[in-house]
Each structure stands twice: as structure tokens, then as C-alpha cells.
Image (cartoon, grey):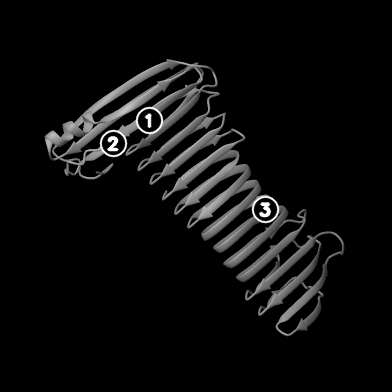
Amino acid sequence: MAGNGNPGKYSKEKKIEKTYLVNPDAHLEVSNSFGNIYVTTWNEAKTAIEVFIKVSGNNEAAVNKRIEAIRIDLEALKNRITATTVLDKMGESKSNLSIEINYTIKIPKNGSVKLANKFGNITVDKLLAEANINCRYGKLTANELLGSRNTIEISYSSASTIGYLKEGVLTANYSDFTLNKSDKLNLVNNYTQAKIKEVNVLDFKSKYGGLTIGSADLVKGDGDYTTMVFGQLSKDIALTSDYGQITINGIEAKANNVSIISRYTGITIGHADNYPFNYNFELTYADLTDNSDLDANKTTVKNTTTYTGFYKKSGANTMTIKSTYGNVKIMKM
């Protein structure tokens, strides 16, 4: 059974169309597989659902039997519409069939959604209310998610994109995605390449992947076996890392504190010439290089060297680094 591939000699289609009068903030729940979900909003107190079902294969009898065994369970209430794709088991059929089940849905502009899709894409335009989205083995494309409690999960997803995520939790597994902008994001990143162009507040945990941040205000995170690259940083950053790489390209003059605790992680930090800071670097089995003219007090005990001092002026901000088996490079931009 497959969602795509060779369509076969025979195909059969059916369409289901329903429109329901609902509350202006009615909730939508959809659970689907082997197809796509497309959701938009409109200025109507209605939820309109269109489901297109297509089955193809080389065995005409198997095609007919399969499409008859696919049903869409709909539950309609004034405050909630639920649509569930049900594929009855057909253990006696060994035919190789292609199945496509696509949803196109319009909901009230203030409606919330809970969408789950497997082996297919999810596309949403602009959602004012809360979005709960789970996309597995497909691509998520979202324009604007303006709710304050969004929950997004993508797994085995390639090239997913989100334009704007106001606030929420994003979990990504074995995927790659781009997020253009977020006000406040809690990110769980596993075996994933994540690119975030702009974020105000970021809290993340990452294992086995890459994280690239264009600009950020506040960052707190833990990255293991993760390559982390940060562009412009305007406030605070606190990181822990094992077996990774940390690059901070631009600590701005108005930024505050930097804190890094790491093992087996190379660290490169670039800072504005007029960013003042006190520093305390504790390096074990690691070396420090800099072009910032750091006038450091240096003490070495066994395999640990501690560097303390300040840059430009004392008492403004702090840069604290504790690194074991990872060299540190400080650069003035």
C-alpha cells in the first residue's frame, strides 16, 4: 500500500463535500493518512470540508474493494468538527495499490485546529487561534500561526517551512525545517537540521543535528552532537554542549551576558568592538586564542587554565566559559 508511485491501469475516485454551520471560533480536528491536508480561513461561521479519494492499481477488483473500504468519519457540533480517515483492513488483498486522500477545508477565521497527517503534507495559511499540528512522513507548510499556544511536531519531514510562529512548542525528529520568525519558541530538535531566521526568545534542546539562528534576543539551550551557529545576539545566551560546535558570529554592543559550559565542543565567539564584558574562562585540555586584546590574568593548575579580566570596562556584562576538550576563540568584529 502506498500513497504515491505507479498509479496502475485502473483508478477510481470519490469526493465527499460537507458544509456545517458552526460557532465563529469552532475547533477543527482532522486525522488522515496517505494524502494532504490543506486548511484556510474565511469570514464565515461555517466549516466547509472537501475530501478527494483516489485509489489506483493493476487489479480492478482490488481497486474497487479498497476504495469502498475507505471511509471518512465526520462528527459535527457547533463548537467542533471532527474528520477521521478510516482505512479498513484488507488482509486478504495483496495487490499493490496507490491511495490518495486529500482534504481541503475552510474554517472560521477565529477557529483553532488539531491536525494529524501521516504519509502526506499539511498546508495552512493564516491561523489566528491555537494550532496543534502533527506531520509525519510529509512536509509542513504554514504561513502565519498567530495563536499563543501552538504545538507543532514534524517527523521524517523534509523542507518544512513556517513563516511566523508567534509562540509555541516545536518538536522536530529526523527532519529539516526553516522558521522565518518567532516571538517565543521552545524547540526540541532530534536528528534535525533547523534554520530559524529571527527569534526573540528561544529555549531549545537538540541532539544529533544542526541549529542555525539568524538573530535572537534571549537564548537558552542544550545541544549534544549538534552544530550550533548564531548570527546576531542582542541580549543573553546560555548554552551547554557535549560533542558539538558553537559559533556566535555577532554579540552586539547592547548585549548582556554569555554563559557556555561544554565538553568536546569547539567554541568561536565574535563580539562588537564596543561590547564591554568581564570574562572568566576555565579551559581544561583546551586552548584560548583571541584578537580582542584581552588583558587576562592567567593561572594554570594541572591541565586547567583559568583566564579572568575584562574588556573595555569592568562590571558591565559577563562572559563565562567552561570548556573541557574544546578550544575557544574570541574575536573582535
Looking at the image, do the residues carrying marks 3 and 2 touch, with CB atoms under 8 Å apart? no
* Three-letter amino acid code of the residue under disc 2: Glu
**Which label is found at residue 84?**
1
* Residue 58 on image: x %, y %: 13, 40
* Residue 18 on image: x %, y %: 36, 19
Residue 271 visible from this viewpoint? no
Indicate the quadrant containing the C terminus: top left, top right, bottom left or bottom right: bottom right
Res 135 → quadrant: top left
* Three-letter amino acid code of the residue under disc 1: Thr
> Which of the two marks, 3 or 1, is nearer to us in this view?
1
The reply, left or right, for residue 247 in relation to residue 98 is right
* Pick the front one: 233 or 94: 94
To which residue does mark 3 refer?
219
Residue 74 visible from this viewpoint? yes
* Three-letter amino acid code of the residue under disc 3: Val
Lower sequence index among marks 1 and 2: 1
Lower sequence index among marks 3 and 2: 2
Res 75 → quadrant: top left
How far apart in space, not on screen, are marks 3 and 1 (Cα)?
Answer: 39 Å
Q: For mark 1, give the secondary structure.
A: strand
To which residue does mark 2 refer?
100
Looking at the image, do the residues carrying marks 1 and 2 touch, with CB atoms under 8 Å apart? no
List the single residue furthest toward the bottom: 302
* Residue 112 on image: x %, y %: 53, 28
The reply, left or right, for residue 141 in relation to residue 283 is left
The reply, left or right, for residue 213 in relation to residue 125 is right
